[in-house]
Amino acid sequence: MSQQLLDILKSTFGDAVLETHSQHGDDTAVVAASRWAEIARFLRNDPRCDMDLFVDLCAVDYPRREPRFEVVLHIYSIGKKHRLRLKTRVGDQDGDGAELDTITSIWEGANWLERETYDMMGIVFRGHPDLRRILLYSEFVGHPLRKDYPADRTQPLVPYREGYEKVAPFGPNEGMSFGRQTHRTGKFE
Amino acid sequence: MGDLTLNNTTTHILEGSETGFATTRVDALLGWARKYSLFAYPFVTACCGMEFMALASPRFDHARFGAEAPRFSPRQADLLWVVGTISQRQAPALKRIYEQMMEPKYVLAFGTCASSGGFYDNYTTLPGIDKVIPVDVYVPGCPPRPEAVIDGLLLLQDKIARGDRRPAIVKPREDPKVISASNLVQLRRKELT
Amino acid sequence: MEPLDLELDESELELPTEPMMLNVGPSHPAMHGTVRIVMELSGENILKADVQVGYLHRGFEKMCERGTWTQVFPYVDRCNYVSPMLNNVGFALAVEKMLGITVPERCQYYRVILGELARISDHLTCNGAMAMELGAFTPFLWMIKAREMVWDIMEEETGARLTHSFGRVGGMAKPPSDHFKDMVRATVPRILAIIAESEALLLRNRIFMDRLQGVGIISAKDALSLGWTGPCLRSTGVAYDIRKAHPYLVYDRFDFDVPVGTVGDNWDRFLVRLEEIRQSARIIQQAVEQMPDDGPINVEDPRIILPPKDEVYTTIEGTIQHFKIVMEGIKVPAGEAYSYIEAGNGELGFYLVSDGSGTPYRVRIRPPSFLITAGLERMIVGAMIPDVVPTFGSLNMIGGECDH
């Protein structure tokens, strides 16, 4: 049913719509980054589309592609019951230059989600009222969801305690002063 | 570490026990009073909070151990329940709350995430709260059953009574009904002849 | 932590009054976990508020990229930890959408019943906690007692009270136990009786009504623009329920209503959740009648489902199948899909990107409570401090889901 949506998009914006597909039944359109906000506003306001419910905004990192990041927007229309996934590609191989216009003025839910995308992937949204980190602390350096950030690199805010004895692994009778009789003695039964 | 026994002829020296009979009885009285009147500060963050709520509920009821009264100011509390995952961002808040409590204070690490970071071995999780504050009892489990937490609470009360500040950990109890069920695969060590 | 005075601009103040900055800090009993609200107050009225979430960020999306598809289930459980079965079902449906398979009918009924029980547990916790924070301690204890009954069923079925990790791609971890239907049939009326008792205590209480009615109002247009879904959206008057609008599993076979509010205040949200418990009970009763008593629970596909243990130990095909699924993961064809279900807080969506291997390339959870909490700021500005507590409680912000 949302094939009509893709047709409307293609007929209105022509070559700004780079590709479309409907894999697994989800209608998707990849658009040029320069017309992102304009297309989003059209989708919200045009009576044939009427996408009033903002669903999700995220980004995916494809480090071997150029442009590197793909910003993915999901929107839905309560009245017309159709759904669309709108994508665009930004950023170069090193992750710099990933900038996109904000759509906070179109759907307010984009405010926090754009902050989260900035926090996790490092995509800067031009015109965002308050672009700061939301899930991580401001002292954090780097953007953890990128593929080149190792998952276990911690940046502690409070230095870890030294000199305490992490208690050695307990023998079968230690550590708990009661109820010992219900524990196994360490041999296979 | 040696075997821990509770007979009167223990060979383990605790602090202050050289000072004589009267002081030892006073210590015992203080220990008894402290252990049955713990004022809890529930530092609840995540899923273990649901089991904490269940612990406060009528079925498991930690009020019968005297540990119910929650005090939401650290100045008025003496038992810090750290319930749930502590992230790196939350760690300064945890440390500050611990420092604001007054001695004698005890910390119970509720859940695996508080004890060791759980299975969140990543950039954002504090790998165990003992990296920032000292812990008295660790209750592992994800989330631990309320019975295991009651084990931990009783263990803590035991330690308070004895004046023992070494950290302890709650060990799992066997459930004989499950172990003897027939559909479990039994592994046996091969007997070498 | 961020400095308190991030929002304060000295030049805008009128002397001699000074606004007071109040930090409702990340560790606070009424914050349902870890949310920090920095408020600028004038007396008891809130002039500005900055809601800071993220104190429970546990790196869910990054962790998913390190394991296999099946290893995501424990992480997903701990996202919305008051209704973990719904998260399991949502993720399993998403991966099954990418694989293009449908689970057998008995499994669909099983998922529906367990999911609706989880939804009941979610709404009981939310309403109970909200009542407790307003001083009504007794309904909280009663609702937790009802929740224990739900958890007894869950423990019998899945083995764990809270974070079951019971869903699997292509089915469930185990078939229903023998007493499943009897336990469900016995429990649901008892839960409804407890709800009726709690309602009798609360719904005509003048203080409770005054604290909730007319507080925390949001319009339907704002809610849609913010991306609200679920009971919070339905309380504003928009009748959008995914179980009715885009039925999945076997929801189209049941006869149930969708409660919708009018004003969009805390009172409506409280009542919508109470009524949804009743509708979930209706669904469960119908599902228990319709569920087949025998039949497979998992799809019959050796590339997706683990073989039975005795086959693993005795046949070579079973060993290879087990090895490949556990070590390499289920091979999901390359592509992307977005799949959504009606979770306790609204539309829980999973956007999955696969590169064809057994490890997910990207798992994006669309957390309903993150978007709902984004609306908290506009609801409390202009209200008083005591209004923050019921407003925040009625949004049912679950930290694990909000901060994923």
Image (spheres, coloured by chain):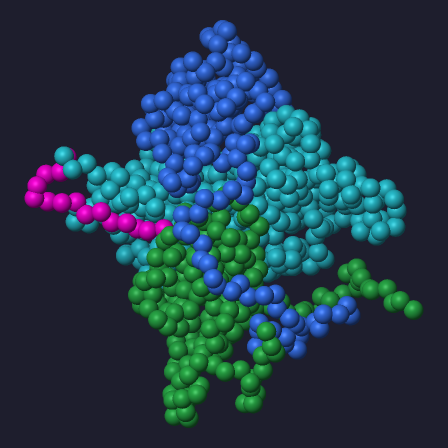
Chain colours: A blue, B green, C cyan
Does residue A164 appear left or right of residue C68 in this picture? left
Residue C182 x, y percent position in the rendering: 66, 58
Instruction: Tell me where residue A45 sits by quadrant.
Output: top left
Residue A99: in magenta span: no
Name the residue at 51% across, 11% down: A17
**Residue A55 showing in the rendered view:** no
Is residue A9 found left or right of C1 in the rendered image? right
* Residue C21 within the magenta-colored segment of the rendering: yes
> Residue C92 placed where, x, y %?
63, 39
Residue at the far bottom in the pictured view? B21
Relative to C84, say whether A63 is above or below: above
Compared to residue A178, the image places residue B130 above or below, namely: above
Is residue C228 positioned above or below B93 on the image?
A: above
Dominant SS of magenta comes to loop
The structure residue drawn at horizontal position 72% and vertical position 57%, both measured from the top left corner, is C178
Residue C174 showing in the rendered view: yes
Picture coordinates of residue A160, whole percent (x, y) = 45, 54
Q: Nearer the viewer, residue A19 or A150?
A: A150
Relative to B124, does residue C353 appear above or below in the rendering?
A: above
Q: Residue at x 68, y 46 (%)?
A: C172
Residue at 61 percent of width and 65 percent of height: A169
**In front of the other: A22 or C223:** A22
Residue A53 location, quadrant: top left
Nearer to the camera, A188 or C347:
A188
Which range of residues does the magenta coloring cover?
Answer: C12-26
Quarter of the picture holding the N terminus of chain A: top right
Q: Residue furthest right?
A: B193
Quadrant of the frame with the C terminus of chain A: bottom right
Which residue is at the front of the view, A66 or B59?
A: A66
Relative image position of residue B20 (x, y in whole percent): 41, 92
